[in-house]
């Protein structure tokens, strides 16, 4: 297909990865290490995605409470790179998604960029995919809006790690999301505070913080939509990061809704900053360091894949013959109310993520990775952590490189060679291989 717009530049690669977030970076690394020529296309001017824009913690590496490690391979290498920069700490958690690996987002940007460049990945920043090219009805490339004009980038396999399934939707893959009446979790603008007295701040327990929130809301002096947000230490002295705001009913694929939601998130963040400064010990002299680069989107489009991960799969800790990653995180639904709904797996249990969840129905030559995988709303609320997004990315990139080597489509790739390649790269895909971490 020849695009009807004026094309300023063209580029050809074996594998095109759209989105340089946790899933996309891992996918590009895995594909390049598998011998493929890889280009990764990113709308911002840096790698890291949500992990460098909104959040500063990898969750999903460990099961809650028991500290069973379920993630390995490329994600471990990124944590090692952060440790080499002295910009990472592990925060023990007996609740939520388990222990968190908290880092400096600026260090994450350089860590990903270094690894991608060393693997020979071509990085294209400040570029937005706006359409898909097709041959015989199937995707064979993308159209990119860049600062230099429109570009046509051709490839044999495309990995959609956009978060919003932008490429899959444009290619005609079936999907579900808020635009089609499906529920979507609330979004969050995070923020970082400097000049915090962290010694005193850490003496405020989680329950005490929530009580102070409730008192502030009940006083009528604060507009705080969420009563149980969190704030945590970072690798930087005197700096704390807060995950407190709640922007409801957002379809992140609607530009008007997203624009309004960005503004609402910032307004809420400033109100939570005022609450902390005025009501919580340790924050009296704190100053706002920065707001997240963009609104943190938990859920938008989800593809309909060859398999759809379900709530029962999660809570029953189901394993799959084509499993390419593991997860032990609970269902963590940030609904529109003031609290969060948690549903846990049995202690220490994990479930598998099938490769088929990364393969969209009806479209060949395309894989997805990250939060746009095929899963129902509740399963998605468990599997969307950045640890699992990186693991899915490693699986998708490995699969893409294998399909080129074996001469098959992603849909026809057999599970055995893929699982063997993932094990060889350090990925943890078998529940029997999990070990307790001291």
Image: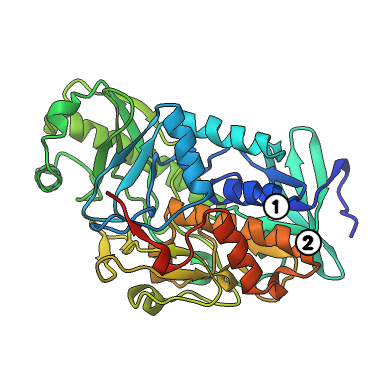
Q: Can you say whether 414 is above or below 193 in the image?
A: below
Q: Can you say whether 240 is above or below 416 in the image?
A: above
C-alpha gap between disc 1 and disc 2: 9 Å
Measured from the top left, where is residue 253 in percent x and y? 56, 56
Identify which residue, 286 or 27, lies in the foreground: 27
Where is mark 1, residue-wise? 34
The reply to whether the C-beta atoms of the residues labelled 1 and 2 are less than 8 Å apart is yes
Element under disc 1:
loop
Q: Residues within 10 Å of mark 1 (few under 14, many from 20)?
A: some
Work out whether residue 247 can be spotted: yes
Q: Is residue 295 left or right of residue 438?
A: right
Q: Which image quarter is the N terminus in?
A: bottom right
Where is mark 2, residue-wise? 405
Quadrant of res 351: bottom left
Measured from the top left, where is residue 357 in percent x and y? 56, 70
Identify which residue, 438 or 315, lies in the foreground: 438
Measured from the top left, where is residue 58 in percent x and y? 40, 46
Q: For the image shown, how many numbered marks are present on the structure?
A: 2
Q: Is residue 300 left or right of residue 233?
A: right
């Amino acid at each position: 297909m020849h695009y009807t717009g004026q094309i300023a530049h063209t580029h050809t690669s074996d594998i095109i990865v759209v989105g340089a977030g946790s899933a996309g970076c891992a996918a590009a690394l895995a594909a390049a290490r598998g011998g493929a020529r890889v280009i990764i296309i990113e709308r911002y001017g840096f790698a890291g995605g949500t992990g460098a824009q909104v959040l500063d913690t990898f969750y999903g590496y460990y099961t809650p409470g028991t500290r069973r490690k379920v993630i390995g391979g490329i994600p471990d290498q990124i944590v090692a790179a952060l440790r080499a920069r002295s910009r990472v700490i592990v925060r023990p958690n007996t609740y939520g998604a388990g222990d968190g690996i908290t880092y400096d987002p600026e260090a994450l940007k350089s860590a990903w960029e270094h690894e991608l460049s060393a693997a020979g990945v071509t990085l294209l920043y400040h570029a937005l995919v706006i359409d898909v090219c097709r041959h015989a009805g199937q995707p064979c490339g993308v159209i990119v809006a860049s600062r230099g004009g429109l570009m046509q980038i051709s490839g044999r396999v495309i990995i959609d790690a956009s978060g919003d399934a932008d490429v899959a939707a444009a290619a005609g893959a079936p999907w579900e999301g808020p635009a089609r009446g499906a529920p979507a979790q609330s979004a969050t603008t995070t923020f970082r505070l400097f000049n915090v007295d962290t010694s005193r701040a850490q003496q405020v327990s989680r329950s005490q913080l929530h009580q102070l929130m409730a008192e502030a809301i009940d006083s009528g002096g604060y507009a705080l939509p969420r009563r149980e947000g969190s704030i945590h230490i970072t690798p930087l002295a005197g700096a704390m990061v807060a995950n407190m705001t709640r922007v409801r009913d957002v379809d992140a694929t609607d530009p008007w809704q997203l624009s309004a939601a960005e503004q609402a998130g910032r307004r809420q963040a400033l109100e939570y900053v005022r609450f902390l400064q005025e009501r919580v010990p340790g924050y009296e002299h704190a100053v706002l360091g920065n707001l997240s680069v963009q609104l943190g989107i938990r859920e938008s489009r989800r593809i309909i894949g060859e398999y759809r991960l379900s709530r029962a799969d999660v809570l029953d800790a189901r394993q799959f013959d084509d499993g390419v990653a593991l997860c032990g995180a609970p269902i963590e639904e940030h609904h529109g109310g003031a609290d969060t709904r948690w549903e846990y797996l049995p202690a220490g249990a994990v479930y598998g993520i099938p490769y088929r969840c990364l393969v969209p129905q009806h479209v060949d030559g395309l894989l997805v990775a990250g939060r746009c995988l095929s899963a129902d709303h509740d399963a998605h609320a468990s599997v969307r952590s950045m640890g699992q997004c990186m693991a899915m990315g490693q699986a998708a990139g490995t699969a893409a490189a294998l399909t080129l080597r074996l001469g098959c489509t992603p849909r026809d790739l057999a599970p055995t060679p893929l699982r063997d390649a993932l094990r060889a790269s350090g990925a943890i895909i078998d529940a029997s291989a999990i070990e307790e971490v001291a």
